[in-house]
Amino acid sequence: MSSFYKLGVIGSPIDHSLSPKIHKIFANDLGLQISYDAIEVNENEIESVVTNLFNQEFMGLNVTLPLKEAAYGLADNLSKEAQNCGSVNTLWKEKDTLCADSTDGRGLVKDLESKGIDVGDKNILLLGAGGSAKAVIPSLLKSKPKMLTIANRTPEKAINLANKFTSGECEVNAAAIDARLNSEPSLIINTTSAGTLKQAIELPENLFSDKVFVYDLSYSFQMTPFNKIAKEAGVKNYSDGLGMLIEQAALSFEIWTSHIPSTDIKREDLL
Ligand code: ATR
């Protein structure tokens, strides 16, 4: 008997979400029947909307900005990774239990690996200390990088995150964004919302070298503003976050359907 999977994504704004397209490509490749709706939801209505959707036989929901922390608060059963992140992007029901996971960090690491980047080898500089940073740090640390430095415009937030994630296996430091760094990173990950907000980004002095790999969590048809700055400063190897978006979606899809989709999707099919 073939199954039908009723799926969707909640957030605000939601109309530009690529998730419906990505999940429909996964389902098509696997010969599965799904529906995947993009549903505009505000923070004050998340609890009633999630309850209603699961009552309407939805089997899985993705959660995007700005609801990832609110969704964390709703879940009865959180994965270990979700507990570490303090936010979730994937919801599903097991009997009467609302379960949740955070697949963003694993998606990032998978995409880096697919680009030949071994996180375990790297001295990482993570720019930003907001929700996106928090969502990817646990997975990065699981890969045991040589060092992780968090730099943020508001230094207290970087210090708080560094304290929260200090582990025995990897040195986690905080740095001010307007200072000169005292170590040379080999992987720079931009988690700030500066590009999305169309704002100029403050950066540490002499940040880039031609040996560093730059990864911007945001994505766009044209080069992202951050990657443009990096390229102009001599960086040769960089990526935007489209691959991470596809990988985190694949991990959610697998949780809901137990099928592993191919993540080999062309940019032109999405953007
Ligand atoms: P998200 O959920 O997308 O991570 P967030 O939690 O609001 O959004 O966090 C945004 C991050 O981008 C913060 O680290 C923010 O720095 P502050 O903590 O100082 O606000 C960072 N950010 C936003 N605009 C920036 C800019 N123009 N330059 C540098 N950092 C910026």
Image (cartoon, grey):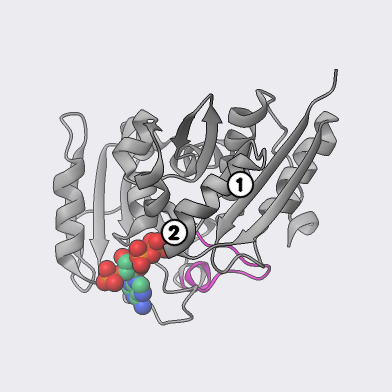
Q: Residues within 10 Å of mark 1 (few under 14, many from 20)?
A: some
Tag shown at residue 53: 1
Q: Quadrant of ligand 1?
A: bottom left
Q: Residues within 10 Å of mark 2 (few under 14, many from 20)?
A: few
Left or right placement of residue 200 versus residue 218 in this view: left
Q: Is residue 68 magenta?
A: no
x 50%, y 73%: residue: 196
Q: Which residues are magenta?
A: 212-229
x 14%, y 64%: residue: 156
Tag shown at residue 210: 2
x 27%, y 37%: residue: 146
Q: Nearer the viewer, residue 117 or 162?
A: 162
- Where the C terminus falls, by quadrant? bottom right
Q: Nearer the viewer, residue 113 or 99?
A: 99
Q: Is residue 225 magenta?
A: yes
Q: Residue 212, how many percent across, how many down? A: 41, 53
Give the distance between the C-alpha atoms of the residues marked 2 and 1, in whole angstroms: 49 Å
Q: Earlier in the sequence, mark 2 or mark 1?
A: 1
Secondary structure at badge 2 equals: loop
- Where the N terminus falls, by quadrant? top right
Res. 193 visible in picture: yes
Q: Residue 238, how many percent across, how many down? A: 53, 57
Q: Quadrant of residue 164?
A: top left
Tag shown at residue 147: none
